[in-house]
Image: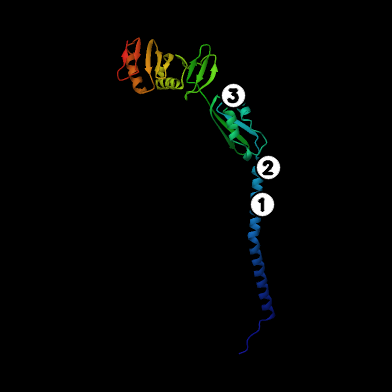
């Protein structure tokens, strides 16, 4: 049987198929390289955009927690430069600079994309004023005496001390004022530290010997009941055995 030799047309078609396959194989070999180059270019562009480009630079510093001149003072203390790429802004330094002021209990500095640095401050708020004879020291809820003022702000009770006020004494006074309900606290005056374990105060016309910071809820309950009879003095330093005169 005689074999049939491929014709001229069939040979050309076969070569064309081989050439197409070769071209496809070459494209497939180059594709990973091209993808890698494109990925590297994209990453490089993003790095430049975020870390070096002025597009994402700091344009404003926003202060939250205080307003007006105090916010401007925080902004100056933070000393955050404008025009620096936001990603490169130091967040620790500004917070440390602001907390050098005793006026603030805490400071948090954060980036707010695309171009803002946010400075959140928690100002100390006075819960009592320690009378020093001529001026007062404002004391916050953690017992920190943070500011000297000519007088106590409205609504802040003034505390006097027998001798130098100790941190324990201030903590006791704060715990007393925190334990009192609002209707009773509004009658309180002449808070005095007789020592780290003895706080006294006036509740209306009644002198109250409170004692230390232990069992505050029981002391409030006993004191509220005993004040109804209008005594001159109430001693709840030992609330299980109170005394009146």
* Quarter of image, res 25: bottom right
Q: Earlier in the sequence, mark 2 or mark 1?
A: 1
The Cα–Cα distance between marks 2 and 1, rounded to whole angstroms, is 15 Å
In screen coordinates, is 142 left or right of 39?
A: left
Residue 160 percent location from the top left of the image: 46, 14
- Nearer to us in this view, 168 or 135: 168
Q: Quadrant of the C terminus?
A: top left
Judging by the rendered image, the residue that carries numbered circle 1 is 41
Residue 54 percent location from the top left of the image: 68, 40
In screen coordinates, is 94 left or right of 201?
A: right
* Quarter of image, res 6: bottom right
In screen coordinates, is 89 left or right of 198?
A: right
- Nearer to us in this view, 86 or 18: 86
* Residue occupying image coordinates x 64% and y 64%: 29
Which element is circle 1 on? helix
Q: Residues within 10 Å of mark 3 (few under 14, many from 20)?
A: few
* Residue occupying image coordinates x 66% and y 72%: 18
The Cα–Cα distance between marks 1 and 3, rounded to whole angstroms, is 46 Å
Q: Earlier in the sequence, mark 1 or mark 3?
A: 1
Residue 192 percent location from the top left of the image: 43, 14
Q: Are marks 2 and 1 in contact (CB under 8 Å)?
A: no
Q: Earlier in the sequence, mark 3 or mark 2?
A: 2
Q: Residues within 10 Å of mark 1 (few under 14, many from 20)?
A: few
Q: Is residue 130 above or below residue 118?
A: above
**Residue lying furthest bottom:** 1
Judging by the rendered image, the residue that carries numbered circle 2 is 53
The Cα–Cα distance between marks 3 and 2, rounded to whole angstroms, is 32 Å
Judging by the rendered image, the residue that carries numbered circle 3 is 70
* Residue occupying image coordinates x 61% and y 23%: 69
Q: Residues within 10 Å of mark 2 (few under 14, many from 20)?
A: some
* Residue occupying image coordinates x 37% and y 14%: 208
Q: Is residue 240 above or below residue 98?
A: above
């Amino acid at each position: 049987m005689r074999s049939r030799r491929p014709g001229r047309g069939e040979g050309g078609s076969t070569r064309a198929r081989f050439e197409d396959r070769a071209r496809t194989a070459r494209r497939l070999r180059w594709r990973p390289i091209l993808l890698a180059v494109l990925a590297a270019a994209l990453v490089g562009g993003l790095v430049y955009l975020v870390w070096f480009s002025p597009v994402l630079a700091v344009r404003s510093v926003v202060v939250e927690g205080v307003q007006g001149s105090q916010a401007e003072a925080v902004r100056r203390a933070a000393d955050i430069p404008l025009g620096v790429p936001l990603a490169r802004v130091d967040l620790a330094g500004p917070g440390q600079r602001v907390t050098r002021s005793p006026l603030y209990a805490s400071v948090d500095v954060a980036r707010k994309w695309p171009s803002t640095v946010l400075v959140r401050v928690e100002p100390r708020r006075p819960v009592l004023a320690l009378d020093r004879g001529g001026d007062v020291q404002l004391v916050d809820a953690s017992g920190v005496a943070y500011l000297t003022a000519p007088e106590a702000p409205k609504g802040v009770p003034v505390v006097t001390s027998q001798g130098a006020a100790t941190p324990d004494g201030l903590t006791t006074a704060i715990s007393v004022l925190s334990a009192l309900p609002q209707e009773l606290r509004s009658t309180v005056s002449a808070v005095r530290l007789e020592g780290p374990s003895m706080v006294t105060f006036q509740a209306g016309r009644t002198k109250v010997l409170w004692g230390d910071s232990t069992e505050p809820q029981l002391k409030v309950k006993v004191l509220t009941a005993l004040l109804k009879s209008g005594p001159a003095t109430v001693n709840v330093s030992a609330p299980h055995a109170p005394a009146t005169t």
